Image (cartoon, rainbow, N blue to C red):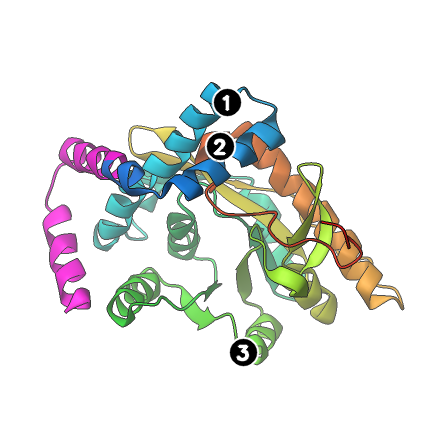
């Protein structure tokens, strides 16, 4: 039922002009902000005040901007069936494409390290439509219908979809020269690598560094940002390589720290596009006994 309902809404959205889609997306975003629990709002405001040294009132405005953007993002995802290889350049442009081309030319696949900033679903879809062999590593949705819908749209865009638990498949696909797309900006508990992020020790996903080290593959930091009038820019950074030594843990730590600094720099440049509502610094490092 959920799947058919979202599919029906998507078909309607696909026949609407841009102005109407934008209006509806903005309204949806404003409505979404009204239903965000007070505790979650406070997490976002506190995160922003601490990370960006902003006064509370400015932090609240930024938190709201960060949350309301999900309305337009959702409308963009519903509009995916209208995007294809022929017209994707009208909606998304690539900045630094040569870095990803050079990384793939090495013949060892590549890992894309990205974050929940901008419309990350459009990031994956657009790279696939530009012809890159992208594997999107995703989290299974609690709603089976919603999970089926979004994965179907990812696949139609040209992405190969695998769940986070499919590590063996990721390694196999990386060996075949594909690009593994990983999000690394959320707190993942004690399993994370504890590196500095916005001046705070943060539990951070080690998947990008671990996979790349295993196959000597380049890691390409990549983010998407909104440029106005329904258009976006994908910013592709120079490849990061794991300095492989006998100390695996230190290698992964060093690379994850480097990637975190790159990610932080992008978020500082586009603070209204990051997911500040997430309790990013929930997990304390093991040695922090008194926290």
- The reply to whether the magenta stretch includes residue 18 is yes
Residue at position x 18%, y 59% from top? Answer: 6
Compared to residue 75, the image places residue 245 above or below, namely: below
Asked whether, in this view, residue 87 is left or right of residue 241, the answer is: left
Residue farthest right in this picture: 246
Residue 53 visible in the snapshot: yes
* Residue where numbered disc 2 is placed: 45
Q: CA distance from mark 3 to mark 1?
A: 45 Å
Q: How many residues crowd around disc 2 within 10 Å: few (fewer than 14), some, or many (20 or more)?
A: many
Q: In front: 265, or 181? A: 265
- The reply to whether the magenta stretch includes residue 225 is no
Tag 1 or tag 3, which sits nearer the N-term? 1
The answer to which quarter of the image holds residue 225 is: top left
Q: Secondary structure at mark 2?
A: helix
Compared to residue 268, the image places residue 247 above or below, namely: below
Q: Which residues are magenta?
A: 1-30
Mark 3 or mark 1, which is nearer to you?
1
Compared to residue 5, the image places residue 14 above or below, namely: above
Q: Magenta-highlighted stretch: main secondary structure?
A: helix
Cβ atoms at labels 2 and 3 below 8 Å apart: no
Residue 133 disc label:
none
What is the total number of numbered labels drawn onto the structure image? 3
Residue at position x 42%, y 69% from top? Answer: 161
The answer to which quarter of the image holds residue 286 is: bottom right
* Residue where numbered disc 3 is placed: 169
Q: Secondary structure at mark 3?
A: helix
Please state, as top left, top right, bottom left or bottom right, where the N terminus lies in the image: bottom left
Residue farthest front in this picture: 290
* Residue where numbered disc 1 is placed: 56
Asked whether, in this view, residue 110 is left or right of residue 39, the answer is: right
Tag 3 or tag 2, which sits nearer the N-term? 2
Asked whether, in this view, residue 21 is left or right of residue 154, the answer is: left
């Amino acid at each position: 039922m959920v799947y058919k309902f979202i599919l029906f809404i998507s078909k309607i959205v696909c026949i609407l002009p841009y102005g109407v889609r934008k209006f509806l997306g903005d309204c949806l975003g404003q409505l979404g902000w009204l239903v965000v629990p007070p505790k979650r709002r406070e997490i976002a405001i506190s995160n922003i005040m601490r990370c960006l040294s902003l006064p509370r009132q400015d932090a609240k405005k930024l938190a709201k901007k960060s949350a309301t953007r999900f309305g337009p993002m959702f409308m963009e995802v519903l509009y995916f069936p209208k995007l294809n290889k022929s017209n994707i350049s009208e909606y998304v442009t690539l900045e630094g494409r040569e870095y990803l081309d050079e990384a793939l030319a090495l013949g060892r696949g590549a890992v894309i390290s990205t974050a929940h900033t901008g419309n990350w679903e459009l990031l994956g879809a657009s790279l696939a439509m530009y012809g890159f062999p992208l594997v999107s590593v995703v989290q299974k949705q609690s709603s089976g219908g919603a999970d089926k819908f979004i994965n179907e749209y990812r696949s139609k865009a040209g992405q190969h979809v695998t769940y986070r638990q499919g590590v063996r498949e990721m390694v196999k696909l990386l060996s075949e020269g594909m690009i593994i797309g990983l999000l690394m900006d959320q707190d993942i508990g004690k399993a994370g690598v504890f590196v500095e992020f916005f001046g705070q020790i943060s539990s951070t996903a080690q998947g990008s560094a671990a996979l790349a080290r295993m196959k000597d593959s380049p890691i390409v930091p990549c983010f998407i940002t909104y440029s106005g009038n329904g258009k976006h820019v994908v910013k592709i950074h120079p490849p990061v390589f794991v300095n492989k030594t006998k100390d695996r843990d230190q290698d992964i730590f060093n690379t994850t720290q480097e990637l975190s600094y790159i990610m932080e720099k992008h978020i500082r440049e586009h603070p209204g596009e990051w997911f500040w509502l997430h309790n990013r610094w929930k997990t304390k490092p093991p040695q922090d006994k008194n926290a």
